[in-house]
Amino acid sequence: MEAFLPILPLTGIVALNVYAYGFWWGYLLSYLGTIAGSTLLFFTIRRLFMAPVHRMAQKSQRWRSIIEKIQKKGFTPSFLLYCFPFAPSFFVSAGAAITEVDTYKFLSALIMGKLVMIYIEQHRFSSGRYA
């Protein structure tokens, strides 16, 4: 749900999973849920909005240059943004979908970045050091 509704706090969802299921089960549920949601969002936006965005890019040099820059650097910025809990994954997934970032690069960045981010959030909640 968090992937489609960026106003939902992922840290709150992670906290609920930690308290309800314990560290490892909470981690696994949070991780798999966020991967599934972001992947579904990626493919939904790619299917629905790719054609209109490319029509705009054909008309505008500025859009074309933005799309080309994101395509060239697809993995690293996506990975870093997925690692931070305060970065809205909705915009990262949507941006990757409409700019034709390679699906393999997107999934690699998503899987590795969310692995780091969910682990950090889980550890903060399970150790009681969340401020």
Image (tube, helix red, strand yellow):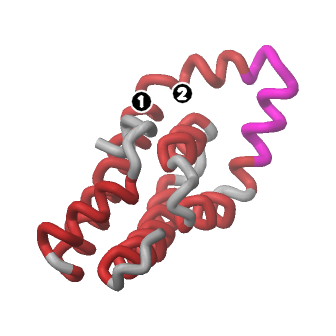
Span colored in magenta? 57-69
- Magenta-highlighted stretch: main secondary structure? helix
Pick whichever, 109 or 1, lies toward us.
1
Above or below, 78 relative to 90: below
Q: Which residue is mark 2?
A: 50
**Rendered location of residue 63, percent (x, y):** 78, 28
Reading the image, the residue beneath label 1 is 47
Q: Is residue 53 left or right of residue 88?
A: right
Q: Residue at x 12, y 72 (%)?
A: 21
Is 124 in front, or is 107? 124
33 vs 44: above or below:
below
Q: Is residue 67 magenta?
A: yes
Q: In the image, what residue occupies the spot 29% across and 42% down?
A: 1
Examine the rendered structure and indicate whether residue 118 appears above or below residue 66: below
Farthest residue toward the right?
61
Q: For residue 65, what is the image quadrant?
A: top right
Please state which of residues 15 and 90 is positioned toward the viewer in this rendering: 15
In which image quadrant can residue 20 be found? bottom left
Q: Amino acid at mark 1?
A: Arg
How far across and how far down the image is residue 102, in percent?
55, 53
23 with respect to 40 (left or right): left
Label 1: how many Cα within 10 Å (few below 14, some 14–19, many 20+): few
The local secondary structure at tag 1 comes to: helix
Q: Is residue 46 magenta?
A: no
Is the Cβ of the residue at disc 2 closer than 8 Å to that at disc 1? yes
Residue at position x 51%, y 61% in the image: 85
| SS at badge 2 | helix
